[in-house]
Image (tube, rainbow, N blue to C red):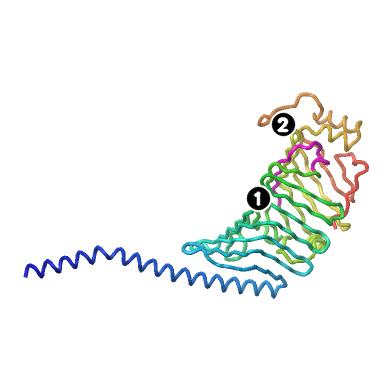
Amino acid sequence: MDEAASAGNARHSRFWLYTPFVLLLLLAVAWSVGWFVIRNRADEALDTWLAAEARAGRQWTCQDRAIGGYPFRIEVTCDALTLQQGAVTASFGPVEAVAQVYQPRRVITEIQGPLRVTDGTVTVQGSWDLLQTSLNLAPGGLRRLSLVAEAPNVTVTGLPAGEIAAAGQHLELHARPNPSRSAENAYDVALSVRQARIPLADALVGGTEATDLESDVTVTQAEGFRGRPLAEELERWRSAGGKLDVLMLSLAKGSRRLEAKGELRLDEEHRPEGQLALSAAGLDGLLGNVMGRRNGALLSALLGQGGGAPAGQANGRPALSPLPPVRLDNGRLAFGPFVIPNVTLPAIY
């Protein structure tokens, strides 16, 4: 009798000894089944989205698409990614998009170069050491888009004003719909570039030092990408009354500093127009170059931009002094009461 009781107790003890391992095994099996279900649904959702994009005229091609990421992520990889819509084509190198199974509305993407976008007239080419994006979605659409690039290098050709080239050490871009201006289809965009090499800035501000650039703007009448040529996209934006509210634009280039706030748009001749309030330090040479030596020297003296001691210091740098507003009107550029001679604003498209 005692021996039978002892055997029962032993079997009972072994049951509780193995129960945690059995439960863990069952949990692993259930999780694996659930992951494959989610994977299949993600694959079907991607096919559905690609079909919807194709019906809208946007042809995406994900070369050698693969889906993995077991056990906690869903990873979609392409050996190359291309887009074609109308006259616009875009191509990238290998792309990897990742979302956690418990946070599917946040997608992290790593994109390799080179980049090439063209509408048959304007061509954008780019390269970088690292490019990552973060896409946060809400049930109603986009909540926030962020982009970070290391050592970006971009060249734009085919513009009426000529080639534009820029390179930098680090770039960050953040965009989101403006919740208080939804009726205007407004988007907030923040851009930061460190140690940029921009020949156009060298010509405008002077010097060959690297440039640190920061901007915070709101773009109204912004729509999703429609695949039209750049000229058609800009004309649609202009005709809809789109404008660029410059909340803050800051440029630092060696000892030169410039800050601007204001509003810009396009006129009927497709030229930029609007007004910017400026503050600057170390731009006495620039004032002389653009206004002529007599007017430039007079304006520099009035504004404290001359070669004397700075009016104050801010974070170890000369304090900014207010400048007269810059007005862009009828293809002319005015600096306060002075119209800058020999400067004509060209049509952007």
Is residue 320 visible in the rendered structure shown here?
yes
Q: Which residue is drawn at 81% across and 31% down?
A: 303
Q: How crowded is mark 2: few (under 14 residues within 10 Å), some or many (20 or more)?
A: some
Residue 285 vs 191, above or below: the answer is: above
Residue 197 vs 141, above or below: the answer is: above
Quarter of the image for residue 181 reads: bottom right
Q: Name the residue under label 1.
A: 129
Could you tell me which quadrant the C terminus lies in?
Answer: bottom right
Mark 2 or 1, nearer chain start? 1
Q: Residue at x 66, y 46 (%)?
A: 170
Q: Distance from label 2 to label 1 (Cα)?
A: 36 Å
What is the number of callouts on the image? 2
Pick the residue in front: 278 or 68: 68
Please state which amino acid type lies under the numbered disc 2. Answer: Ala
Residue farthest right in this picture? 342
Q: Which residue is drawn at 79% across and 42% down?
A: 201
**From the viewer's perspective, is 81 left or right of 68?**
right
Pick the residue in front: 16 or 300: 16
Q: Name the residue under label 2.
A: 319
Q: How crowded is mark 1: few (under 14 residues within 10 Å), some or many (20 or more)?
A: some
**From the viewer's perspective, is 112 left or right of 327?**
left
Where is residue 165 drawn, in percent x and y? 78, 49
Q: Give the range drawn in magenta.
A: 201-217
Is residue 236 visible in the rendered structure shown here?
no
Where disc 1 sits, the SS reads loop
Pick the residue in front: 278 or 123: 123
Where is residue 232 drawn, in percent x and y? 81, 64
As for residue 214 lying within the magenta part, the answer is: yes
As for residue 141 lying within the magenta part, the answer is: no
